Image (tube, rainbow, N blue to C red):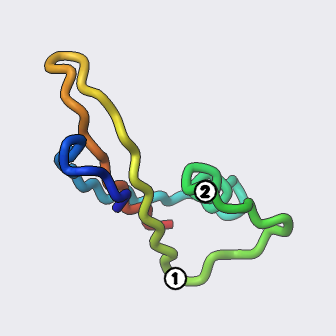
Amino acid sequence: RPALPPALAAPTVPYKLFLSGKSGVGKTALVATLAGTPVPPVHHETLGIEATTVYWPAKLRASGRPVIFQLHFWD
């Protein structure tokens, strides 16, 4: 979770996102890009499940309040 000063504290909303599909279509590359980590240069099949957590800040249009989405990607 990103460290924020108390004046900017925002609620965290967790989501679990499960990615499935055919082998080699870019699921792992998509998660790596969203997480800001390097995309693997060579294709290798993901064995089992790889879990990655990404924190995504946003501001709600209706209320203007900040919120932090905690996205758990299961690849």
Q: Could you tell me residue 49's position as x and y percent?
A: 48, 77
Corner quadrant of residue 73: bottom left
Between 43 and 22, the residue placed more toward the observer is 43
Classify mark 2: residues with Cα within 10 Å, few (<14), some (14-19) or many (20+).
Answer: some
> Residue placed at 59% from the left, 83% from the top?
47
Q: In the image as oriented, which residue stretches furthest toward the top?
A: 62
Q: Amino acid at mark 2?
A: Lys
Q: In the image as oriented, which residue stretches furthest toward the bottom?
A: 47
Between 9 and 54, the residue placed more toward the observer is 9
- Identify whether 75 is placed above or below 67: below
Q: Secondary structure at mark 1?
A: loop
State left or right for residue 47 relative to residue 25.
Answer: left
Q: Could you tell me residue 27's position as x and y percent?
A: 60, 56
For the residues labelled 2 and 1, say whether their Cβ atoms are less than 8 Å apart: no
Q: Could you tell me residue 65's position as x and y percent?
A: 19, 28
Q: On the rendered image, what quadrant is the N terminus found in?
A: bottom left
Classify mark 1: residues with Cα within 10 Å, few (<14), some (14-19) or many (20+).
Answer: few
Q: Could you tell me residue 26's position as x and y percent?
A: 68, 54
Q: Secondary structure at mark 2?
A: helix
> Residue placed at 21% from the left, 21% from the top?
64
- Identify whether 55 is placed above or below 7: below
Query: For residue 48, which numbered disc appears in the image?
Result: 1
Sooner in the amino-acid sequence: mark 2 or mark 1: 2
Q: Amino acid at mark 1?
A: Gly
According to the picture, the residue beneath numbered tag 2 turns out to be 27
- Identify whether 18 is placed above or below 51: above
Rounded to the nearest angstrom, the CA distance separating label 2 from label 1 is 14 Å
> Residue placed at 24% from the left, 41% from the top?
8
> Residue placed at 37% from the left, 57% from the top?
2
Corner quadrant of residue 42: bottom right
State left or right for residue 46 relative to residue 1.
Answer: right
